[in-house]
Structure formats: structure tokens, C-alpha cells
Image (cartoon, rainbow, N blue to C red):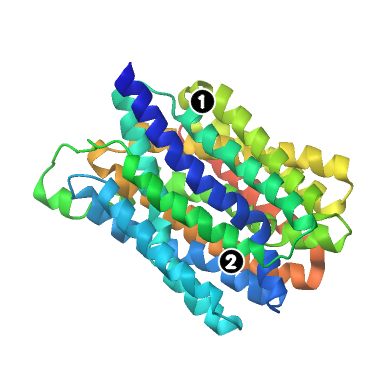
């Protein structure tokens, strides 16, 4: 029991630090970039960089980590390098300088989450822990960071965003030192073990999974890049913006806490189809109104559009991917749906927003409907 509690604490601490960082970055980074004089399309380009870098760096680093004895050492190296590069934001100015710094920071940062998820899935299986409960602690940290920092910005300069992000990176790097060890894999044949990414990308079921969950995750592109700017422009103050982000994460926590087993046993096609329909509803509401009560309802649907789809994705990888390829499976999920897909939807979504403002959310609704039809047709083809 003592070992089990120690493992839970170590994993939870790392998620807490990582999501404190994200709780500042996601709602307020665009405001810091705007304060530096960047246009909406330039902001979209910089915010798209982490997603774009995931395409190459996350799979390459994770494939190398699959062949190592432990995941935590590559994880520590990645976080430390990103922390070092983040320092240069304090002296950087102008679009191209900030772009180069962002590329450097995200040379290794995209591999942090898939490696952490791989450690967590392995340890939850080994010690009979619930992934959703551990992940939800990170979501609570996201809420606290978003809400408290939103209140802080009401009376303080937006320049403090960078300081908060930097401190979050320091805590993230330090928390990796207390992660549990012992994530060794069973070795497989030399041909398969030398190219786990190639092995996975030949699997038709895995390709369907990547495509469907990709549409669902891509639908968040305008929300992640432009929602804070849009709400601020419509007269919603910073603490309310933080509250709206928090409502979405509260809904996400509820899904992680109470629907973990359900989402781990039901058919993935059914889950993704339901999420697609509710996602289309969410983005349509956000395209048509900035009424706070309606926005709160739309944010509650984040529990499905992100929470349910992500939890189903983690369970798919856990149950359908060989253990020795776990890091590569997580990294491909990070690289393609969360990387290539999110980079495209973030950048092109910001371009659409620059010309059509909130109507850009209708393009996100269309992506959710694509996921719905992919799931429905998959069911029919397998009958």
C-alpha cells in the first residue's frame, strides 16, 4: 500500500506541475503575444509551432525511449532543454525572433506528454491504479492556475504571463525527478523492435483511430488559439475568461473521475460518434453567441469533446497496442492528431478568424461531423 501511494503521489505531482504550466499557457499565452505586437495570424502561427513540432520530434524521441531501460531519463532531458530555451523569451522581440525561440523550446517539449502518459499507463497497470483519477489531478491544477492567474491579471501587467510560464517549467522539470522507476518493456524481435512506428502505421485499425480522434482534437484549434482574444474583444474580462476555461476543465475532470471504466469498455466507434455530435453542437453555440450562460454550457461540453475522446484514446492505446510499442503509440497519437492536425486547425482556424471572426467555429463543427461519419461508416463496414 505504501509503494502504491508513493507511485500515485509521484505521478500526480508530475501531472500537477505540467498542467499548472498549461493552465497559464493555454488561456493567456495569446494575450502575451498580442501585447508583444503580433497580429492574429502571427499569433496563430506561433501557437501552431508546438503542434507542428510534435509531428517529427515526439515520435523520434519516443521511439528512442522505447529502446531504453527507463522513460524518465529521456523525459528529464526533454524538460530541461525546453526550460533552458524558454529563458530566451525574456530577451526576444518581434515575430521571427519569437518564432525561432518557440521552435527551440518545442524541439523536445512535445515528447514530454507522451512519455509521461506512457509512464503513467505502465504504472497504473502495474499497481492497479486508475488513470483517470491521476489525470484529473492535473486538470484541477489547470483550473487553479487559469482562475487564479486570471484574477491576478485583472490588476497586473500581462508581462507576468511569461514569468508564470517560466516558473511552471521549473516545477515541471523538478517533478520528473520523483517519477516512479521500473518501466522496462519485454523485448521483441529485432526487426519489429527497430521500427515500431512503421509497424503501427501498417495497422488499418490504428490508422482509423488516428483519423477519427484527429478530427475531434483538431476541432479545438480556434478555441485554443483565439477564444481568449475573441472573448476579450467582446468585452468579457480576464477573470471571466479564466472562469470559462475552468468550467471546461471541470467538465473534463468529471469525465476522468467517473466515466473512466465506461469509456474503457464501450466500443470506440460509438464513443467517437457521440463526441462528434456534441462537438458540433458546442462549436455552433460558440460561433453564434458570447452570452456567458451559453458559453458556460458550451464549455461543459469540453468534458466530451476533449475529456471523453482523450480518455477513449488512452484506453485504445493501452488495450490495442503491444506494450513494447507503448511509447511510439502514444507519440503517434501526440504527433498526428495532436500535432499535425492541431497545427493545421490552429493556423488555418486563426486565418479564418481573422476574416470571419466567431464564424470560424463553424469550421470546427464540420470537423466534429467528419469524426461522426467516420465512426458511423466504420460500424457499417464491420457489420
Q: Residue at x 60, y 43 (%)?
A: 142
Q: Residues within 10 Å of mark 1 (few under 14, many from 20)?
A: many
State the quadrant of the N terminus.
top left
Residue 81 point in image, percent of width and height: 36, 64
Decide which of tag 1 and tag 2 comes sooner along the chain. Answer: 2
Residue 30 point in image, percent of width and height: 67, 65
Q: Residue at x 80, y 65 (%)?
A: 357
Given residues 232 and 40, the one toward you in this image is: 232
Given residues 181 and 381, the one toward you in this image is: 181
Q: Residue at x 49, y 50 (%)?
A: 211
Given residues 325 and 140, the one toward you in this image is: 140
58 displayed left or right of 278: left
Q: Which mark is residue 337?
A: none
Q: Look at the numbered disc 1 and give the secondary structure of its residue.
A: helix
Given residues 122 and 272, the one toward you in this image is: 122
Query: CA–CA distance between discs 1 and 2?
Result: 30 Å
Q: Look at the numbered disc 2 and give the secondary structure of its residue.
A: helix
Residue 148 point in image, percent of width and height: 69, 46
- Name the residue that disc number 2 marks: 47
Residues at circles 1 and 2 in contact by the CB criterion of under 8 Å: no
Q: Residue at x 13, y 42 (%)?
A: 188
- Name the residue that disc number 1 marks: 260
Image-quadrant location for residue 106: bottom left
313 displayed left or right of 327: right
Amino acid at each position: 500500500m505504501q509503494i502504491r501511494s508513493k507511485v500515485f503521489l509521484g505521478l500526480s505531482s508530475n501531472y500537477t506541475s505540467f498542467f499548472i504550466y498549461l493552465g497559464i499557457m493555454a488561456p493567456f499565452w495569446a494575450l502575451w503575444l498580442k501585447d508583444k505586437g503580433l497580429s492574429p495570424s502571427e499569433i496563430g502561427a506561433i501557437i501552431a509551432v508546438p503542434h507542428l513540432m510534435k509531428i517529427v520530434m515526439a515520435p523520434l524521441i519516443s521511439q528512442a525511449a522505447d529502446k531504453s531501460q527507463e522513460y524518465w531519463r529521456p523525459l528529464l532531458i526533454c524538460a530541461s532543454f525546453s526550460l533552458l530555451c524558454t529563458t530566451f523569451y525574456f530577451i526576444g522581440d518581434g515575430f521571427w525572433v519569437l518564432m525561432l525561440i518557440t521552435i527551440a523550446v518545442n524541439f523536445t517539449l512535445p515528447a514530454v506528454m507522451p512519455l509521461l502518459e506512457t509512464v503513467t499507463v505502465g504504472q497504473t497497470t502495474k499497481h492497479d491504479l486508475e488513470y483517470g483519477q491521476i489525470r484529473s489531478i492535473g486538470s484541477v491544477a489547470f483550473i487553479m492556475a487559469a482562475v487564479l492567474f486570471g484574477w491576478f491579471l485583472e490588476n497586473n501587467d500581462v508581462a507576468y504571463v511569461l514569468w508564470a510560464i517560466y516558473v511552471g517549467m521549473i516545477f515541471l522539470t523538478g517533478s520528473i525527478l520523483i517519477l516512479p522507476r521500473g518501466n522496462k518493456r519485454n523485448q521483441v524481435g529485432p526487426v519489429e523492435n527497430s521500427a515500431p512506428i512503421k509497424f503501427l502505421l501498417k495497422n488499418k485499425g490504428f490508422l482509423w483511430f488516428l483519423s477519427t480522434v484527429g478530427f475531434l482534437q483538431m476541432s479545438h484549434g480556434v478555441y485554443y488559439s483565439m477564444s481568449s482574444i475573441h472573448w476579450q474583444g467582446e468585452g468579457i474580462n480576464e477573470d471571466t475568461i479564466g472562469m470559462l476555461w475552468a468550467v471546461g476543465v471541470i467538465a473534463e475532470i468529471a469525465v476522468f473521475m467517473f466515466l473512466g471504466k465506461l469509456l474503457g469498455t464501450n466500443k470506440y466507434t460509438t464513443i467517437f460518434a457521440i463526441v462528434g455530435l456534441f462537438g458540433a453542437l458546442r462549436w455552433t453555440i460558440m460561433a453564434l453567441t458570447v452570452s456567458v450562460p451559453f458559453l458556460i454550457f458550451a464549455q461543459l461540453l469540453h468534458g466530451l469533446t476533449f475529456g471523453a475522446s482523450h480518455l477513449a484514446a488512452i484506453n485504445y492505446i493501452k488495450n490495442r497496442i503491444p506494450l513494447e510499442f507503448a511509447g511510439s503509440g502514444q507519440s503517434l497519437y501526440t504527433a498526428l492528431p495532436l500535432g499535425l492536425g492541431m497545427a493545421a486547425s490552429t493556423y488555418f482556424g486563426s486565418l479564418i478568424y481573422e476574416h470571419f471572426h466567431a464564424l470560424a467555429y463553424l469550421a470546427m463543427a464540420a470537423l466534429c461531423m467528419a469524426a461522426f461519419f467516420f465512426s458511423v461508416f466504420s460500424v457499417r463496414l464491420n457489420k
